[in-house]
Each structure stands twice: as structure tokens, then as C-alpha cells.
Amino acid sequence: MIIKKPRKKIPQNFIHELIERTDIVELINKHLSLKKTGNNYKTLCPFHYEKTPSFTVNPQKQFFYCFGCGVHGNAIDFLIKHEKLDFLSSIKELTELNGIDLPYIQKNSELKKKYFYKKNIYFLLKKISSIYKKNLLKIPNEAYSYLVKRGITYISMKKFSLGFAISENNQITNYIKEKTAINTSILIDCGISIQNIKNNYIDRFKKRIIFPIKDQYGRIKGFGGRIVNDKNYPKYLNSPETITFHKKKNLYGIYELYLHNPKPKKILVVEGYLDVISLTQFKINYAVALLGTIITSYQVKKLFQISKNIIFCFDGDDAGRKANWALLNTCLPFLYDHYKIDFLLLPNNEDPSSLIHKEGKKKFEKRIQQSEPLYSFLFKRIPYKINFNCIQDCIKLSLFIIPLIKKIPSTVIKIHLRKILGDTIGILDTYQLKKLIKIKKKNTSPLKIKTIKMTTMRLLISLIIQNPILVKKIKNIKKIQTFQINGKSIFIDLIQLIIKKKIFKTGHLLEFYRFTKWEKIFQYFSIWDHMISKKNVHNIFKELLHNLEIQDLEYQYNQLIIQEKKNGLNTSEKKKLWNITKKLIKIKNFIYQ
């Protein structure tokens, strides 16, 4: 029987429905670049380093599996493993993507309250964004005039949902009080309001152009605001850290990028909101912006999930150049053989927005094509002067560069940089450089899973888990229930569950056994290589069912023989033994004739 843990708060039927609604190929393709291969989809595995794609997604089974490292599962498992979510958070993510509500068994549970509170915040942020948009489009106003002056078109303003926070202290707060039933305290939690010294709610954003910061699905997570004509306030202001907004995890323009091309060949990473919007106006639809000049490991990983070719383009000032070094340090640990990082250094006092309006798309794209590769940037843009005729300077350079090279996981890139370093500082002895920069050999061999003994029952269970449709081949479940064979009860339970719930996909079936004592063994069976070709599965399955009957007859025969030796058999028992013997002889003669 399926044993559920009491902590589980979501109805199992709902989870099954959610898995049914979710297309695992579509879900994973939002995070990885899948390529169709036959009936499946493949890509390089995100969970281990490899050169040849072994990560496979099967749309028929709604299941993913890596032949390299053995990671596998359904849509929920992918979010848990790839996005580092817990079980409940992955369920929430799928409900939001599918546009359905999340029911809880306990009506007043804390989990339910938290879920709907977050949902209210998303609703509220969307509503507030529409107010800001109306403010901007009430022409004339200073925000609209500034955007037009910067070359931003009306179409772009609408596409990026730009808005304007007017100078009033509590336009948003008053609106929420008057027009909605939502408690105004939620305005603090979503980062829209602050409390002044008199404990009154006032709007956080005033006299600012508003840039809604969306996730890849279009949900507004928070806002960025740029001041207009008032030097007494910071130029830029973001939403604070909230239940929906985490500055270090967001990229501006990600939603618009996905709308145009979810799998771009390259991504141009810029510094400002207006840079992204201006580039998009000129049909450079692969730009995103950091929320500040400091990049995080999370953002680097997210960028490389979208594209393997990243170009960093920062303003041509000292701050921009320093930012590139910080970017370099953060990105190096993610740099595998098939990944590429370039740097586009702009002229002094220019940013992407100003430059593309001056010189147009063709010239700007030419700059992109001529971006400086990481290798060149690493050696030519060192933040201090080096005299290559001075031994001390060469040592200084080595001490600076070697730790950076060691951070890179790619063997090929390490060897290339090691050679450049040797040529630069005049150490042509490859052996000496190898000692300085050791290259660890990565174990790329497939994951070895501890094998278990193959029995008829285990093989039947594995075949059913991998091909739930096989239950239709079983004509007499009641007869199997009479068999005296180990594993019979779970086999019957599995069959009845598939029939009752009409589950015909592996990814869906495994979800019913999450948090049960069968979870791990069933996951093992889901990827068990039983060496049976797809075209022979149905015939082998029928033979195995027949084998169960033989095993049961042999069990009865052995029990009667034991009893005969101990106490003898009565007439009916002798007759039963004779009938069993005839059946076994007939079956074996049929098999071996």
C-alpha cells in the first residue's frame, strides 16, 4: 500500500492533475536548449560536465534521464534538482505556470496562507504597474518627455510596461485603501510603501520612471525607479528584498528576451534598463541588464542556461572597466569547453543606449562581432602596468593570473591560457607551467548504480513502471492475487493504481510514490536497464506473467512434497499433487519442444 507522510498538505489527486497538465519538454526547454532526436529530446546534462549530450527527455513518459550521471525524474524533480526548490515550492511553481490555484487539505494551514499571500502580492504588483503606466501616458509629463528625449518610443514604453511614479506621497497607498479589500500592510511586504516617522504609509517611489522587473514568465517581481529632474535623491532605486523580489537573482529584460527568442545564440549583458530597451528598439533582441554592476553566481548560471555565448557590455568609464574584472572572477568557475565569454568595451562616456542611437544597428553589431575574447581580456586588461623585461613584474603577473586560471573547469581553456601565460612571461618549459597550473582529470564515466538481483517479479514491476500501458495486457488480476510469490502485493497495488487513476506515463506514476517506502526502489526500477528492446517489451511481459504462474505451481508442488515426507498426503492432496505435476510437465514440454 502507498504510505503517505502526515506532513503532506496537498491532495495527491491534485498533484497528479498538475503533472498531467505540465509538458515536461516545454518546462525543461525554458531552462535548457533541447534538441529533438527521434522520439526524444537531448541536451548537455546540467548536473555534470560532459562533451556529448546524454541528458534525455521523453515526452511519452513525461520523464527525464541522464545516461551519464543517472539523474532522473518528472517535472517536479527537475525543478527540485535544477532550480534548487523544495517539493512544495516546485508544486507552487507549476501551479503558477499552469494558472491554477493550489488547494490544501488543511483549510487554515500556514502553507495555504503563505501561498495566497504571495499570490496577492503578484496581483497587487500587476495592479500597481497599471497605475504607473497610466501616469506615464497622461501626456505631457516630465517622465514621458525624458524618455522621448532618450529616444524611447511609445511602442517600447508599452512593450516594457514602463510607468511613472508621480510626486504625490501616497497615490498608490490611497488607491489600495479605496479600491481594494487588501490590507494596506501588504504594501510594506511587497516593497511599494514605507512608513514615515509618524508611522503613516507613504509611497516608496516618487518622481521616478518605473521599470517593472519581470521573471521569464512575465510575472512582475518588483520595480526599478529612475529619478527625473531631482538631484537630491539617488539616481536609481530598486524594490527592497521581498517575498517575490531578490535583486541578486533577477535579470532585467529576461521576459522580453524569451518572448522574442527563448534560445538565443548569444546574450548581451548590459548595465541599465534603458540600454536593454534601446537595443531592443534597434532589433537587438538578446540584451538583458544586471540590477547593478555586480553579478552573482546565480545570474551567471541563469545566463548560461539561456545561451552558451555571453558578451558583457558595460559603460566605457573606470567603473565599467572595474565591473568587468568583477564579472570575470564570478564567471570563471562556470566556464566549460563549450561556453564562451567576451567583453565589449565602449568608448569613454558612452553607454549602449547613447551609442546605438548615435551610430545605428549595423555599426553597433560590428562592435559586438569584434568583442574582446576572455583570453585577450585576461592578459591585456590587467589592472596595473607590467614591465615584461622585469622578473619581479612577471612573477607578479603569474601570481595574479594563475589563481584565475585555476578557477576554470574547462581543461581545453586552461591549457590555452597556460600557453599564453608561458609565452607572455617567457617560461617556455611546459613541465614547469604544468606544475604551477595542475589540471585535474574529471571523471565523466557513467554513474555506477549498485545492481540488484533480477527476478521475475522485479522485472515485471520495472516493465510496468517504465511502460504503465502494459497493465492492459493483464486479463486476470484475481488469479495473480492467489499466487504465493514475494512482491505480489506491491505488484497488485501498482496495477490497481494505474487502472484506477488511468496513469500511462512513468513521470506521473512515480509521483504517487513520492514520500513512501517504495520511492527509491521505484525510481531505480524506472531507469533499470533490463536489456529488453522496445519491440519485444509486450511479448516478454506476457512471458513473465506466464512465469509467475509456473513459479506458483512449483511453490505448491514443493510444499506438497515437503508435507508428504513429513506426514504423508491424504487422497485429495495426492490428487492435487498429481494435477500440478501434469500441468508442470505440459508447460515445460511446450516450452522446450
Image: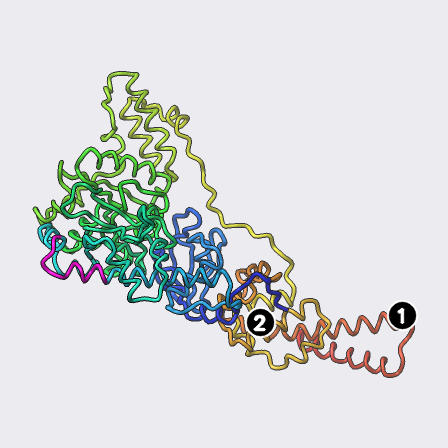
SS for dot 2 = helix
Q: Confirm whether the magenta stretch covers residue 436.
A: no
| CA gap, disc 1 and disc 2 | 37 Å
Outermost residue, right direction? 567
Q: Is residue 482 above or below residue 362?
A: below
Q: How is the image coloured?
A: rainbow
Amino acid type, callout 1: Lys
Secondary structure of the residue carrying tag 1 is helix
Q: Residues within 10 Å of mark 2 (few under 14, many from 20)?
A: some
| Nearest to N terminus: mark 1 or mark 2 | 2
Q: Residue drawn at (81%, 71%), measured in percent from left and top?
A: 559
Q: Which residue is disc 2 drawn over?
A: 540
| Position of the N terminus by quadrant | bottom right
Identify the residue under disc 1: 565
- Marks 1 and 2 in Cβ contact (< 8 Å): no
| Residue 3 image point, x, y percent | 62, 65
Which residue is at 13% across, 46% downward?
229
Q: Nearer the viewer, residue 316 or 28?
A: 316
Which of the two residues, 117 or 475, is positioned nearer the viewer here?
117
- Taking the image as drawn, is residue 304 in sight? no
Question: Type of residue at label 2?
Answer: Ile
Q: Give x and y (percent) for residue 45.
A: 41, 52
Q: Nearer the viewer, residue 580 or 267?
A: 267
Q: Is residue 319 above or below residue 573?
A: above
Residue 546 position within the rendered picture, expressed as x and y whole percent measured from the top left: 65, 75
Q: Which residues are magenta?
A: 131-142
In percent of the image, x 42 and y 46: which residue is there?
49
Q: Which numbered dot is residue 58?
A: none
